[in-house]
């Protein structure tokens, strides 16, 4: 099976886009154009974007935005207001800790308490008619980093399907979204699930799946080491500190990549048992990987996942 892969850099990561017919290669650059367009709208890592315009107007006025920004903010706010751990208003805390950047420091209790007051998703007002977003309190900030890559992956898949690309792989730095059937007789894809202790090319196991999304979140990729303590980048909106957990990583298998992003966060905040209580959709499967090298799967993945790293144990 021939494949044609282009590698790009955007969204703060390495992106690999693959098609399987030479005539479809132009679709790779079209997808990259879409990524850049979305990133220009949604990033909070630059001084100018539509999301930054919303943040800069916090406590002052509502900001009308494009359909893309509004749809994504609306979905993020809906999930945030369910208060199960995912919180699109976490921006002030993320910026305070700044884990993953050279200026990261452990903040004081006072700083954390002050920023926590600015992370209430109930203080985000949406106006469908005006397509506007209003953060009611000055200093509030949206951070869509926990959801934007999934949204963009889904947008690429839609673009490709509309243009007759019936087989492909979208890999946005660990967010993998499959398009169409594989060349295996079953039509299923074999996807390596990343090991949380190793480099990106070492696998925990192999997943057999339809043209679904595979998203992995982990505490092992970005962290801050200070005075013998290690702080990962997944913030707990209830405490203002990195979430306390025995988990190393959560992988989500879902039809939409945006749902993979959401449920990987919910998995971290609610652990295995708590996440199962929230899960009412059998098309979403989760793999929980723990620090003691045990792995727990939701029932719908038990026949689809094959463990290849024998240093781990399925329980």
Image (spheres, rainbow, N blue to C red):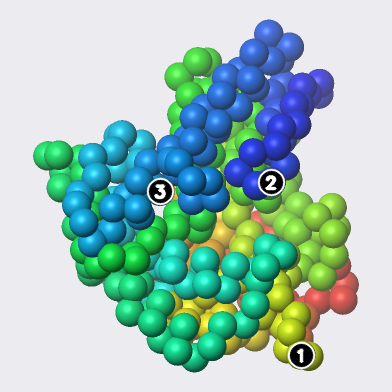
Which sits in the foreground, 311 or 261? 261
Whether residue 291 is visible to the viewer of this picture, yes or no, is: no
Task: From the image, state whether disc 1 or disc 2 is nearer to you.
Answer: 1
Image quadrant where one finds the C terminus: bottom right
Identify whether 292 is placed above or below 195: below
| Residue 119 relative to residue 160: left or right | left
* C-alpha distance separating marks 2 and 3: 20 Å
* Residue furthest left as drawn: 129
Q: Residues within 10 Å of mark 2 (few under 14, many from 20)?
A: few
Which sits in the foreground, 146 or 201? 146
Which sits in the foreground, 224 or 60? 60
Q: Which residue is mark 3?
A: 52
Q: Which residue is mark 2?
A: 13
Mark found first going from the N terminus, 1 or 2? 2
Mark found first going from the N terminus, 2 or 3? 2
Q: Residues within 10 Å of mark 3 (few under 14, many from 20)?
A: many
Q: Which residue is mark 1?
A: 227
Give the residue drawn at x 28%, y 53%.
57
The secondary structure type at the circle numbered 1 is loop
Give the residue drawn at x 64%, y 39%.
10
Task: From the image, state whether disc 2 or disc 3 is nearer to you.
Answer: 3
Mark found first going from the N terminus, 3 or 1? 3
The secondary structure type at the circle numbered 3 is helix
* C-alpha distance separating marks 3 and 1: 34 Å
* Residue furthest top as drawn: 23
Q: Position of residue 97 (x, y in %)?
A: 57, 73
């Amino acid at each position: 099976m021939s494949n044609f892969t282009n590698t790009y850099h955007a969204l703060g990561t390495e992106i690999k886009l693959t098609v399987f017919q030479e005539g479809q290669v132009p679709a790779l650059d079209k997808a990259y154009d879409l990524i850049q367009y979305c990133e220009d709208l949604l990033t909070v890592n630059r001084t100018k974007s539509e999301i930054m315009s919303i943040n800069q107007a916090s406590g002052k006025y509502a900001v009308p935005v494009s359909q893309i920004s509004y749809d994504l903010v609306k979905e993020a706010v809906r999930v945030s207001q369910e208060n199960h751990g995912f919180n699109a208003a976490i921006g002030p805390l993320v910026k305070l800790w700044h884990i993953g950047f050279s200026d990261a420091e452990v903040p004081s209790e006072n700083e954390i308490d002050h920023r926590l007051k600015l992370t209430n998703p109930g203080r985000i007002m949406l106006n469908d008619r005006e397509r506007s977003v209003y953060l009611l309190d000055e200093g509030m900030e949206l951070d869509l980093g926990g959801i934007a890559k999934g949204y963009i992956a889904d947008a690429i898949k839609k673009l490709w399907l509309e243009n007759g690309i019936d087989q492909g792989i979208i890999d946005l730095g660990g967010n993998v979204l499959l398009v169409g059937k594989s060349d295996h007789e079953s039509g299923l894809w074999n996807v390596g699930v990343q090991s949380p202790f190793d480099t990106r090319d070492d696998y925990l196991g192999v997943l057999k799946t339809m043209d679904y999304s595979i998203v992995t979140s982990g505490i092992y990729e970005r962290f801050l080491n200070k005075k013998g303590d290690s702080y990962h980048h997944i913030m707990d909106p209830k405490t203002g500190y990195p979430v306390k957990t025995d988990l190393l990583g959560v992988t989500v298998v879902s039809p939409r990549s945006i749902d993979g992003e959401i449920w990987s966060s919910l998995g971290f905040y609610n652990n295995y048992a708590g996440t199962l209580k929230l899960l009412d959709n059998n098309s979403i499967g989760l793999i929980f990987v723990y620090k003691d090298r045990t792995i727990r799967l939701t029932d719908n993945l038990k026949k689809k996942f094959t463990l290849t790293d024998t240093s781990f144990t399925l329980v």
